[in-house]
């Protein structure tokens, strides 16, 4: 028996491949799939949400948020006037199917959230930052707009769908794939968020105009926000993280006001005048 | 944090690591292959064969267990691509060269052991591969070990 001292052949066990091409194909492919799935999930949620009966929503979610919220609000003297202001705003939405509850969250970051079941949560930080009743009315009107369009359910549904997508990707691909899918998914949903904010602004503006005869509260609120600092600067970071302040949001607001003939300037009432 | 800055950090750091790992990984691989080829040429005359028994013509005077092993790490770039590949399926081309290098290096270390011990050949050569899991996240691998082992033999009539 003879021993053949030949060297191993290169290129049989290792594919000759351009790694960069492989990388581009994989990143592009997986990102495209993630965007498509996230987009499809968002569209599906948007299709389903209008058909969820309000009674079902109330049955499912009543008691989810209000208990924790009430303990905060019980010690806050601003709850009463806030609830009154909300009642006045709701008064301009005759077909409103919800019975709303106000919750004051004891956090310094200014923010307001529409929660499933008809709870509007407002943070202590927001109540301290607003300069007039009109601004507050606009914030409440904006959240009412979210309820009318049932954005709170859309947001929840998209969140669930998105988490499921990430879990599925994580099971299949691990860390890098999750990170990529999460970026792609956020990108895909960005347009949905923007649309919702602008729609909610529109509704808030209409309520504001009906209540005061002008919409100076909204204009003041946005001016006030930009005075306090742009997106991401300190105190307002949390508000912007849930309410992306696009330039086109302000533009849309001005456009709507102009179109409907609502005055952007007008007398503003001090916030919480009734309680003092 | 400003959303733009946050996005930049979330995108930028992994991207920078990917670019870095692409270049370092390619350079390491090139140098590794160069050294492997040099060794293979140097020890090509020493038979490392998979026969379970020595050929009858060999007069064995001494034998022992010889091992050669190597641990190679996956780089960030390869791990990232393999993670994506796991979603869509197909050949994990980025890991092929990694395993190829590890197997060949382990064999070279096996031969080096044999040469240093004065053995003339290695019979019944076997290869074992073992993946090393990340402690933090057992889903992804930190690296792999390839162990080559066989029986080194000293011969009266060296081939």
Image (cartoon, coloured by chain):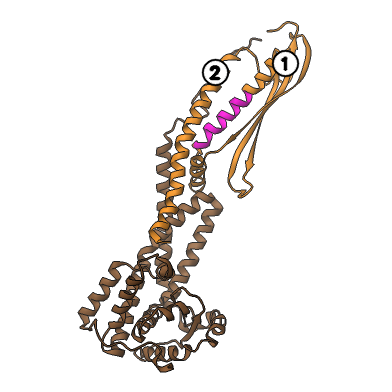
Question: Does the image show residue A116?
Answer: yes
Q: Looking at the image, which residue is at 42% across and 87% down?
A: A97
Left or right: residue A145 compared with residue B146 = left
User: Magenta segment: does it hold B49?
Assistant: no
On the image, the x and y values in percent for residue A235 come to: 43, 70
**Above/below status of A33 relative to A71:** above
In the figure, the brown chain has which letter? Answer: A
Q: Which residue is mark 2?
A: B38
**Above/below status of A18 relative to A30:** above
Q: Chain for mark 1?
A: B
Q: Chain for mark 2?
A: B
On the image, the x and y values in percent for residue A128 come to: 43, 80
Left or right: residue A35 compared with residue B89 = left
On the image, the x and y values in percent for residue B95 come to: 53, 36
Q: Looking at the image, which residue is at 70% across and 12% down?
A: B120
Give the magenta range.
Answer: B94-107
On the image, the x and y values in percent for residue A149 come to: 38, 78
Marks 1 and 2 close (CB-CB < 8 Å): no
User: Magenta segment: does it hold B101?
Assistant: yes
Q: Which residue is mark 1?
A: B117
Q: Looking at the image, which residue is at 49% across and 34% down?
A: B25
Image quarter hosting the N terminus of chain B: bottom left
Q: Main secondary structure of the magenta part?
A: helix
């Amino acid at each position: 028996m003879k021993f053949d001292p030949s060297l191993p052949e290169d290129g049989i066990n290792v594919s000759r491949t351009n790694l960069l091409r492989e990388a581009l194909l994989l990143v592009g492919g997986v990102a495209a799939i993630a965007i498509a799935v996230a987009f499809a999930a968002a569209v599906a949620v948007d299709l389903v949400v209008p058909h969820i009966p309000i009674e079902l929503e109330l049955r499912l979610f009543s008691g989810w948020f209000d208990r924790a919220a009430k303990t905060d609000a019980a010690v806050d003297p601003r709850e009463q006037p806030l609830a009154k202001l909300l009642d006045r705003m709701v008064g301009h939405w005759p077909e409103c199917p919800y019975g709303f509850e106000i919750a004051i969250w004891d956090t310094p970051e200014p923010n307001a959230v529409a929660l499933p079941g008809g709870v509007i949560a407002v943070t202590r930080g927001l109540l301290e930052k607003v300069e007039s009743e009109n601004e507050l009315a606009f914030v409440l009107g904006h959240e009412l707009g979210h309820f009318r369009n049932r954005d709170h359910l859309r947001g929840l549904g998209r969140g669930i769908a998105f988490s499921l997508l990430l879990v599925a990707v994580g099971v299949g691909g691990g860390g890098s794939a999750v990170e990529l899918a999460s970026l792609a998914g956020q990108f895909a949903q960005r347009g949905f968020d923007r649309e919702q904010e602008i729609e909610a602004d529109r509704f808030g503006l209409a309520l504001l105009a009906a209540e005061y005869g002008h919409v100076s509260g909204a204009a003041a609120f946005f001016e006030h926000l930009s005075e306090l600092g742009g997106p991401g600067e300190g105190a307002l970071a949390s508000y912007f993280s849930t309410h992306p302040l696009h330039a086109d949001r302000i533009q849309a607001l001005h456009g709507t006001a102009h179109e409907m003939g609502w005055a952007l300037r007008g007398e503003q009432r001090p916030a919480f005048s009734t309680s003092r | 944090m400003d959303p733009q800055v946050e996005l930049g950090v979330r995108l930028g750091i992994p991207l920078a690591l990917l670019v870095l790992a692409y270049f370092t990984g390619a350079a390491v691989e090139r140098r590794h292959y160069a050294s492997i080829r040099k060794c293979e040429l140097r020890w090509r005359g020493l038979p490392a064969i998979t026969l379970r028994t020595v050929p009858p013509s060999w007069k064995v005077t001494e034998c022992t267990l010889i091992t050669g092993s190597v641990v190679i790490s996956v780089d960030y770039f390869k791990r990232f691509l393999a993670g994506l590949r796991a979603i869509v399926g197909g050949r994990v081309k980025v890991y092929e060269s990694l395993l190829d290098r590890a197997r060949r290096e382990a064999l070279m270390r096996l031969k080096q052991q044999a040469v240093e011990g004065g053995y003339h050949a290695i019979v019944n050569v076997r290869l074992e591969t073992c993946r090393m899991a990340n402690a933090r996240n057992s889903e992804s691998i930190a690296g792999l070990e390839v162990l080559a082992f066989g029986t080194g033999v000293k011969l009266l009539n060296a081939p």
